[in-house]
Image (tube, grey):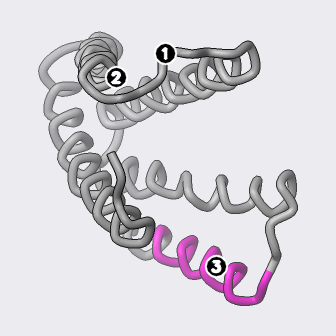
Amino acid sequence: MDFPQIGSAVFFGSITMVTWGIWVVLGNAASESIDPRTAAAISYLVAGLLALGFVIVSDASFAINARGGLLAGVAGLFTGIGLISMYVGLSAGSTTTVSTLGAMYFVVAAIIGMIVFGEKVTATRLAGIAFAVLGVVLVAR
């Protein structure tokens, strides 16, 4: 699957935004109907099967090396922790607060990118992070 890089990033980023927004709302409803931990498990079981199906029908490589497999596994571990946290949080608090705070994951990724991977620290990036934090404070009130 070849897509132009900029158009592809915006296209798939937009799909992610919409589908994750719907996921949070449906996850909130599920957490109010059944145990949030069970809802989280069902949600990710379905997601895992969808991802596996996508790998099978696409041109994805099945070659896995130790480093890539380990990194993907650890990423899955953190994904699972975040998923369970989201569902339990939704059962305890408002969708607005929990989803807004959860959506701040990009700030964590940006900070790690600058500290660990040596990405440039610029005034624009720091201002973007500050505005994102301010946005969360305003939305969560």
Point 80% across, 66% down: residue: 119
Which label belongs to residue 130?
Answer: 3
Point 78% across, 84% down: residue: 122
Cβ atoms at labels 1 and 2 below 8 Å apart: yes
Disc 1/disc 2 C-alpha distance (Å):
8 Å
Q: Amino acid at mark 2?
A: Val
The disc, 1 or 2, on the residue closer to the chain's N-terminal end is 2
Disc 3/disc 1 C-alpha distance (Å):
41 Å
Identify the magenta region.
Answer: 122-136
The disc, 3 or 1, on the residue closer to the chain's N-terminal end is 1
83 relative position to 73: left or right: left
* Closest to the observer, 99 or 1: 1
Q: What is the quadrant of the C terminus in the image? A: bottom left
Helix, strand, or loop for circle 3?
helix
* Closest to the observer, 98 or 106: 106
Label 1 Cα neighbours within 10 Å, binned few <14 / some 14-19 / many ≥20? few
Q: Please tell me whether residue 90 is drawn above or below residue 42 in the rendered image.
A: below
Q: Amino acid at mark 3?
A: Ala
Q: Please tell me whether residue 122 is drawn above or below residue 58 in the rendered image.
A: below
Which label belongs to residue 55?
Answer: 2
Q: Please tell me whether residue 3 is drawn above or below residue 79 in the rendered image.
A: below
119 relative position to 104: left or right: right
The reply to whether the magenta stretch includes residue 85 is: no
Which label belongs to residue 140?
Answer: none
Point 25% across, 13% down: residue: 42
Which label belongs to residue 62?
Answer: 1
Residue 20, x across and y down, in percent: 28, 47
